[in-house]
Each structure stands twice: as structure tokens, then as C-alpha cells.
Amino acid sequence: MDHKGLFLTFEGLDGCGKSTQVHRTASLFRNAGFDVLELRDPGSTSIGETVREILLNPKYSTMDAVTELLLFAVARSQMVAELILPALDKGTIVLSDRFYDSTTAYQGYGRQLNLELVLKLNAIGAHNLVPNLTFIFDISPQLSTERMMLSGKLPDRLENEKMTFHERVRKGYLEIAQKEPTRCCIIDGKKSEEAIQENIYHELIRRKFL
Ligand SMILES: Nc1ncnc2c1ncn2[C@@H]1O[C@H](COP(=O)(O)OP(=O)(O)OP(=O)(O)O)[C@@H](O)[C@H]1O
Ligand SMILES: [Mg+2]
């Protein structure tokens, strides 16, 4: 699949700096004269936001792991069809706060669902779209918890999981990057917001995306 635009995704544990860097990267592209679309997965469409509410609501503590996997694919499928593919065709730079690597890391490695099944559903939910570049901000589960407590947000259903779950998710992200080193760029999430933005800027220049 070849599009005029670019599709970049931002990944990592809660509080690793995804939203911060999506906004900063959007500014970089906008200042260079590009059209930019900022999205969050799950969400961004009316259907997707409704599914997001179900996925993150702590009241659904009994949600089955396969149900969860399918719901993420549902929300993503709508976002790809309704927003991402049309935007890429117009030459827009699409930035997504999480995408299918989150499903691989959380449902595959965290929940330990069959990886082959997860990857198959990821491809279906993404309409076979693959990001041009994925930034993975690597932080420890301890730093993740500290940042979440500092920001004062109430934990959602997935954030309520145990430390060992988040350790597996972190390892999952690192393995994804190992398997797809060209697509993925790991950045040390302990660094300052400015230092991380600098890393992102240099990676975009190196790939002639900016
Ligand atoms: N590099 C950084 N160093 C220190 N603090 C940071 C850094 N990046 C972001 N923060 C702070 O950490 C908190 C979480 O950042 P942010 O919301 O960008 O993370 P996130 O990955 O989007 O989290 P979530 O998964 O919960 O949406 C915020 O309070 C933010 O100001
Ligand atoms: Mg965020």
C-alpha cells in the first residue's frame, strides 16, 4: 500500500510521554507546512470513542481477554477506514497515540493471548495498514506509576493491572522493536521532554520525513 501521506505511531506504557510527543511532533510538521491529523487509539471516531469507554471503564473488571482483543480491533478498524486512509490519500501526516503495537504488547504479552491470533486480528483491524514509523518510549513500570500518580489521573481498567503485567508489556514492546527494527525506533522515556523531541526530530530528518 502506497499513500501520499505518512502514518506515524507513538507507543509505550502509561505516562511514557506519548500524548506529549504526539502534540510536539504535530507542531514540528505543522510549522513545516504539512497538514496533520492527531488521533488516539482506541477512539477518535464516534464508534471508537464509544468502544473506548467500554474498554477503559473500571466497572467492566470481568471483561474476557478475547472480548477485549476484539473490541480494540473494532475501534481501530473504524478509525482506519473513516479517518486514516482518507487522510493518507490526501497527503496528510497522521499521528496516532497508540496503534496495534499496543494490542500486541498488552493483549499478546500482557494478557498472554496467542500471539499469532493477536497479529492476525491486528492486521484485520488495521485493514493491513502498517505505520511508516513507530516511536516506542521505553520506561519502567515504576516510572510509569510515578508519572501517573503525579498527573493525578484516576487509573483506568488496564492501568489497574499488576506490576508483573506491565513488566511483560514493556518486554513485549522491546520484542516488537527487535522483530521490526526498520519500522520501530526505541527512545529512552526517562529523558526530558525536550531531549525526546530532539531524538524524534533527528529520526524524522534522517528518514527524510521532514
Ligand atoms: N520526558 C518526560 N519527562 C518527565 N515527565 C514527562 C515526560 N513526558 C511527559 N511527562 C509527564 O508525564 C505525564 C504523562 O505524560 P503523557 O500524558 O504525555 O504520557 P502518555 O504516554 O500519553 O500517558 P497515558 O498513556 O496515560 O495517556 C504528564 O504529566 C507529562 O507532563
Ligand atoms: Mg496519553
Image: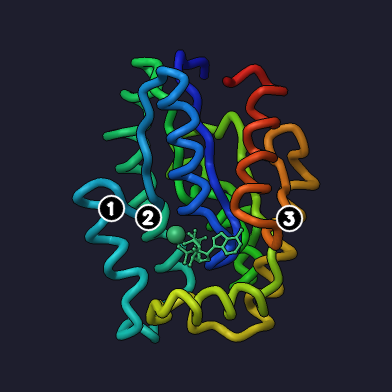
Of 122 and 148, nearer the camera is 148
Q: Is mark 3 on a helix, strand or loop?
A: strand
Q: In which quarter of the image is ligand 2?
A: bottom left
Q: How far apart are marks 2 and 3 (CA)?
A: 24 Å
- In the foreground, 8 or 203: 203
From the image, tell me which residue sits under label 3: 188
**Mark 2: amino acid:** Pro
Front position among marks 1 and 3: 3
Query: Badge 3: few (under 14), some or many (20 or more) residues near its Cα, within 10 Å?
Result: some
Secondary structure of residue under mark 2 = loop
Label disc, if present, on residue 3 of the rendered structure = none
Q: How is the image coloured?
A: rainbow
Q: What amino acid is at disc 1?
A: Gly
Q: Is mark 1 on a helix, strand or loop?
A: helix
Whole-angstrom CA distance, mark 1 to mark 3, is 30 Å
Q: Which of marks 1 and 2 is nearer the N terminus?
A: 2
- What residue do we see at 52% from left, 19% from top? 1
Instruction: Report if the CB atoms under discs 1 and 2 are less than 8 Å apart.
Output: yes
- What amino acid is labelled 3 in the image? Asp
Q: Can residue 118 be seen in this view?
A: no
Q: Name the residue under label 2.
A: 42
Q: Nearer the viewer, residue 70 or 43?
A: 43
- Identify whether 71 is placed above or below 187: below
Disc 2 or 3, which lies upstream in sequence?
2
Q: Residue 48 carries which label?
A: 1
